[in-house]
């Protein structure tokens, strides 16, 4: 496709619905309640989502040389390499026998340029991805389908999550065979629990891509991780972390970062994150390569730094990659609220205060 076939970014591509502000306020209030509850229960402030870190890695993002002009945007304008920190995670802070969506959060260091928010003084770009291509449609759908259920679930015993996951996986399989629609919450609860290193990860929502709009994905590239795709990894309480540690003890990994560019607001919508962008309409295009060398993927110091000192936020980004759409706008307030509460709850409990890394050596060995 030629560049003129892609939607040109302008502020009007976003359309804020009349219920959004009220839904955002309700989500923030729920985050405040659930954060207080979990802190009282655990004696420690934790992330609202993807609290369970299952691998802490350093690596490199290599932006490809010779990209076409429509891909040479923002972070990808020039062929160069950036040091990165990657935090792998699972959505539920529970035993890995409770299968849950996997997360792949990237912090790109040494990024310069105008930022999306005035309070971002870092030189970092965060890219947050999970192993589901689509998400809740918008802020209201997230409030009703996820946040309220998450708040209710805090008092449920773990075995009910396992029963719910079993039923959800059966419904997902039925939906995939018949084409019937099932709610996003059931798809999340029905995650198959495969090896995290073989998964493909997605930004779920849209973001500005310089002159255009895109969704990003990270896909296994080297044979070492491609052969793990679809391999079960849920037969132990901490099997995901153990599998990551065991892999990187003897292996390196390569992933490819790709972009799907928005063509029009009907087939590739921005405000409805529940609709997958068809690959025959907008095929994924390669932007660069992520390399993760052999290393110790977990140590007490590295885990403490990644879990307590670092935070990841899709709004910590260049202006050229500002998150777009309802489900991405709510994250601006939701992530800030969760991060602020967690940091306040843990004051005096962690050795190193929260902050942004300036160089890759800030991540301990």
Image (spheres, rainbow, N blue to C red):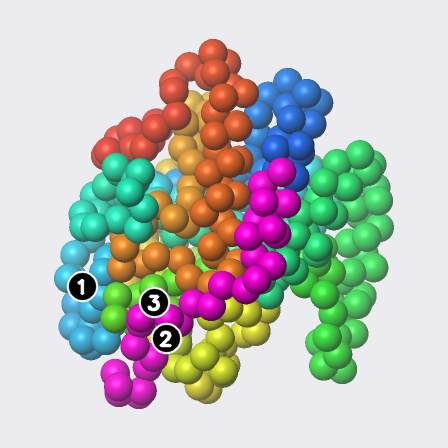
Q: Secondary structure at mark 2?
A: strand
- Give the CA separation, mark 3 to mark 1: 21 Å
Q: Quadrant of the C terminus?
A: top left
Disc with the residue nearer the chain's start (2 vs 1): 1
Q: Nearer the viewer, mark 3 or mark 1?
A: 3
Q: Is 317 rendered above or below residue 217?
A: above
The answer to the question of whether label 3 and label 1 lie on touching residues, with beta carbons closer than 8 A, is: no
Q: Secondary structure at mark 1?
A: loop
Q: Which mark is residue 261?
A: 2
Q: Based on the displayed image, in which of its 4 quarters is residue 174 positioned?
A: bottom right
What residue is disc 3 on?
Answer: 11
User: Is residue 102 visible to the viewer in this orientation of the structure?
Assistant: no
Q: Earlier in the sequence, mark 3 or mark 2?
A: 3
Segment colored magenta: 1-29
- The reply to whether dot 3 and dot 2 touch (C-beta < 8 Å) is no
Q: For residue 216: magenta?
A: no
Where is residue 281? Give x, y as percent. Answer: 44, 86
- Disc ID at residue 77: 1
Local crowd size for mark 1, using a 10 Å CA cut-off: few (<14), some (14–19), many (≥20): some
Q: Does 16 appear in magenta?
A: yes
């Amino acid at each position: 496709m030629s560049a003129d076939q892609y939607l040109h970014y302008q502020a009007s591509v976003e359309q804020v619905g009349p219920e959004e502000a009220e839904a955002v306020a309700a989500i923030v209030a729920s985050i405040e309640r659930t954060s207080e509850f979990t802190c009282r229960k655990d004696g420690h402030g934790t992330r609202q989502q993807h609290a369970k870190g299952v691998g802490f890695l350093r690596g490199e993002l290599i932006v490809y040389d010779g990209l076409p002009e429509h891909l040479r945007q923002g972070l990808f304008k020039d062929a160069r390499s950036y040091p990165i920190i990657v935090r792998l995670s699972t959505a539920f802070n529970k035993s890995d026998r409770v299968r849950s969506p996997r997360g792949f959060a990237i912090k790109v260091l040494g990024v310069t340029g105008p930022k999306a928010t005035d309070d971002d003084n870092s030189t970092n770009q965060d890219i947050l991805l999970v192993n589901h291509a689509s998400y809740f449609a918008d802020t209201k759908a997230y409030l009703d389908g996820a946040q309220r259920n998450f708040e209710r679930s805090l008092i449920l015993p773990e075995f009910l999550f396992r029963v719910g996951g079993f039923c959800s996986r059966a419904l997902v399989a039925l939906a995939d065979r018949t084409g019937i629609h099932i709610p996003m919450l059931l798809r999340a609860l029905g995650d198959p629990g495969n090896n995290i290193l073989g998964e493909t990860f997605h930004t779920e929502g849209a973001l500005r891509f310089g002159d255009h709009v895109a969704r990003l994905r990270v896909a296994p590239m080297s044979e070492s991780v491609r052969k793990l795709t679809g391999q079960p990894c849920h037969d132990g309480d901490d099997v995901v972390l153990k599998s990551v540690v065991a892999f990187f003890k003897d292996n390196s990994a390569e992933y490819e970062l790709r972009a799907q560019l928005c063509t029009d607001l009907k087939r590739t919508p921005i405000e409805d994150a529940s609709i997958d962008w068809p690959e025959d309409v907008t095929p994924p295009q390669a932007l660069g390569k992520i390399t993760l060398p052999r290393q110790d993927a977990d140590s007490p110091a590295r885990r403490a730094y990644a879990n307590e000192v670092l935070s990841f936020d899709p709004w910590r980004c260049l202006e050229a990659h500002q998150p777009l759409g309802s489900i991405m706008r709510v994250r601006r307030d939701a992530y800030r609220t969760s991060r602020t509460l967690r940091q306040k709850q843990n004051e005096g409990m962690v050795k190193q205060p929260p902050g942004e890394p300036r160089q890759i050596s800030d991540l301990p060995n």
